[in-house]
Amino acid sequence: MTETKPLDPGTTALLTIDVQPTVLSRFSDIGGLLERVRATIETARDSGVFVAYARVYLTAEEAAAVSPRNKMFGHFAAMTPPPDGPESQVDQRLGALPAEPVFRKTRMGSFSTTDLDARLRERGVDTLVLTGVATSGAVLSTAREAADRDYRVMILSDCCADFDPEVHRVLMEKVLPMTAEVLDAAGFEGILRR
């Protein structure tokens, strides 16, 4: 874990990525992930942090446009897309509020196929805090996209999960600290309360 500097809640956004039933159903065990993410969302909201969500959903036409050469996302796109219903929405257990934006993405990262960057910049956001799944997919891609756009990036390790716990551990301990500040939900709450 990295040592964190103070942050301004008014220029900070919390983005929860792909925490939706269609994605969560692929996990054998997510433990207390939903409870930790929900508590973190509530803490962020109470502190004045901008809260947003990204969800992945492709229409049949969008899925057909993804090349089979795309090793990671091509596999996801090749699955028959379900109707765009409750299973592809942000998981209701997170308690998302109607005023909190949800960005529908059609690629792994949360920036390239959404107006997330423009919406964050409109609000003066310079710090992006990430939670969600999967660490080796959407979280990693979004962290790198955000860093390339010069955001301060923070990743809450216990509010993310991967299909392989060892991959999650290696990414959080070895890879993501090169791109982002990695801390847990309690650490994030601590710097918000400073």
Image: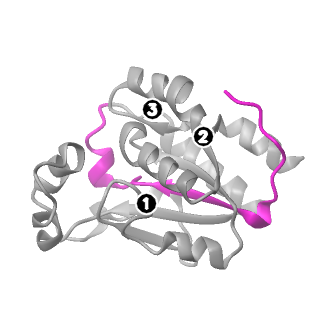
Q: Residue at 27% across / 65% down in the picture? A: 57
Please tell me whether mark 1 sits on a helix, a strand or a loop: loop
Give amino acid for label 1.
Ser
Q: Which residue is mark 2?
A: 156
Q: Quadrant of residue 13?
A: bottom right
Find the distance from the CA under tag 2 to the CA under tag 1: 17 Å
**Residue 83 coordinates in the image, percent (x, y):** 17, 69
Give amino acid for label 2.
Leu
Q: Which residue is mark 3?
A: 31
Does any portion of residue 136 appear in the rendered image? yes
As rendered, which of 51 and 67 lies closer to the eye? 67
Q: Which residue is mark 1?
A: 110
Residue range (magenta): 1-28
Give the number of the disc on residue 37.
none
Please tell me whether mark 2 sits on a helix, a strand or a loop: strand
Find the distance from the CA under tag 3 to the CA under tag 1: 24 Å
Q: Residue at 39% across / 55% down in the picture? A: 109
Q: Residue at 27% across / 44% down in the picture? A: 25
64 is higher (above) or lower (below) than 154:
below
